[in-house]
Image (cartoon, grey):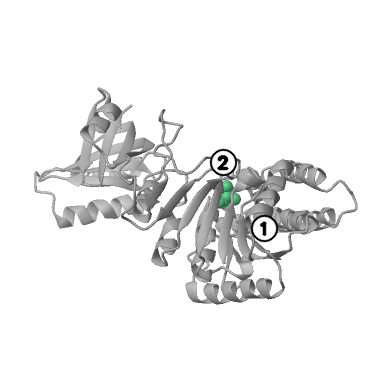
Amino acid sequence: MEVYKFGGASVKDAAAVRNVAGILRSEVTDTTCVVVSAMGKTTNALEVVLDAFYQGRPDAAQTVKAVVETHLHILHGLFPDPAHEAYAKVKALFTDLMREARSLGKTPYDEAYDRIVSYGERLSTCIIAEYLNDQGIGTAELDARNLVITDGHFREGKVLWEPTAERIRKAAAQVREDGLLVALTQGFIARSEDGKTVTLGREGSDYSAAIFSYCLDAEKMTIWKDVPGVLNADPKYFTNTQKLDYISYYDATELAYYGASIIHPKTIKPLQNKHIPLHVRSFMDVAAPGTWVGLDDVPNSEIPSFICKPKQVLLSIYPKDFSFIDESNLSEIFGILVKNGMKVNLMQNSALSFSVCLDQTRGDLDAVLSQLSPRYDCRFNQELELVTIRHHTQEVIDNIVGGREVLLEQRTRQAAQLVLKI
Ligand code: ASP
Ligand code: MG
């Protein structure tokens, strides 16, 4: 079985949903598992809804209106007949959403978050399943919460692979037996063993598709995007980007980990473990070749790739007693970083100092500084940029630096990482 994943942008309005149906009609010949995200920016809108209800704001009910309106607009675009069943189904989901939002009470925030935000994906599959069936594309809508079982860690569920695989295989086999072409399910959402709704982390639908691919031993997974494939740099930060025809699992993981926004970082590992190829294709240009992600030793893997992480702090730490940096200092420093929620992107030590590059927008830097201050002197710079260049050459590095000050640099054979002033 193959697995397709359509993200929010690919189902953002009625025309986009029609396009998805067109892709399925032209591409799918055998039962296929299709994972979809919430439509457009619905997840962001539901975060607003959650916060309004959670804080008991008087205008809370108003915040749902925006979500209702976008979905109604899409329904009108897809189902001209106002008596179509899709309207009643969507209405029932909104009734449930309101009921749940009103009864959050003292539910812990992260649990409430997953409960409310999951409606985005549920609305999306509800509408798309109705539309595909209307179009004669036999579709079963499967609730991912009955299939993907997690440890119950809200907003970041960890998959329990055995029960998940068993359920997914069974459900998919049933869809095939029923002679349907599409097993449609939600990305991002899952549940705990005791039946509570759990999500897998923002932008987690790619990861969901990888979970389905792994459990189904898929021949192939396809992510449909609004770009022609994986580019060697984010066009937001770099000009003259180049599409990569083929990259290794290893490169894809490294690119995603250091901030390339094209693929969710957790996506590659399950695919790599079973050697399932990933094809990243454009939903706007089905004829375009896209990018293949697969095993190493591949053609054109030497094209340099650039990933830029803005908003970095470089913190340099010096023991006050001029002792050397050793394992016990490092363990103390890391304890403080972890305790204060810092995300470490790069580190380097010398005899007398230890430097770390951290996300500026995560954790509590002031607390870190004050907890280090009894035993360490600290210096730091903010508003820096961490640039990772895979398959670097000196010329490429010189170009990126372009006369800027380099505060820290690390090189391996595969990658160069530079912390730069903007
Ligand atoms: N809808 C979720 C989000 O926007 C999951 C996803 O799109 O991957 O984060
Ligand atoms: Mg999304």
Q: Secondary structure at mark 1?
A: loop
Q: Horizontally, is 327 left or right of 210 in the view?
A: left
Q: Which of pointers 1 and 2 indicates the residue nearer the eye?
A: 2
- Frontmost residue, 41 versus 287: 287
Q: Horizontally, is 371 left or right of 187 in the view?
A: left
Tell me: residue 206, above or below residue 397. below
- Frontmost residue, 393 versus 270: 393
**Which amino acid, by three-letter code, is at mark 2?**
Asp
Q: Is mark 2 within 8 Å of ligand 2?
A: no
> Can residue 131 be seen in the rendering of this structure?
yes
Q: Quadrant of the C terminus?
A: top left
Tally of numbered tags: 2
Residue receiving disc 2: 226
Tell me: residue 67, above or below residue 130. above
Q: Secondary structure at mark 2?
A: loop
Q: Horizontally, is 114 left or right of 262 in the view?
A: right
Q: Quadrant of the N terminus?
A: bottom right
Residue receiving disc 1: 104
Residue drawn at point x = 74 percent, y = 43 percent:
14
For marks 1 and 2 on the same chain, the one whose residue lies earlier in the sequence: 1
Badge 1 vs badge 2, beta-carbon distance below 8 Å: no
Alpha carbons under labels 1 and 2: distance apart: 36 Å
**Which amino acid, by three-letter code, is at mark 1?**
Leu
| Spot occupied by residue 140 in the image (x, y as percentages of width and height) | 71, 65
Identify the mark at residue 162; answer none if there is no mark. none
- Frontmost residue, 48 versus 410: 410
| Spot occupied by residue 327 in the image (x, y as percentages of width and height) | 16, 57
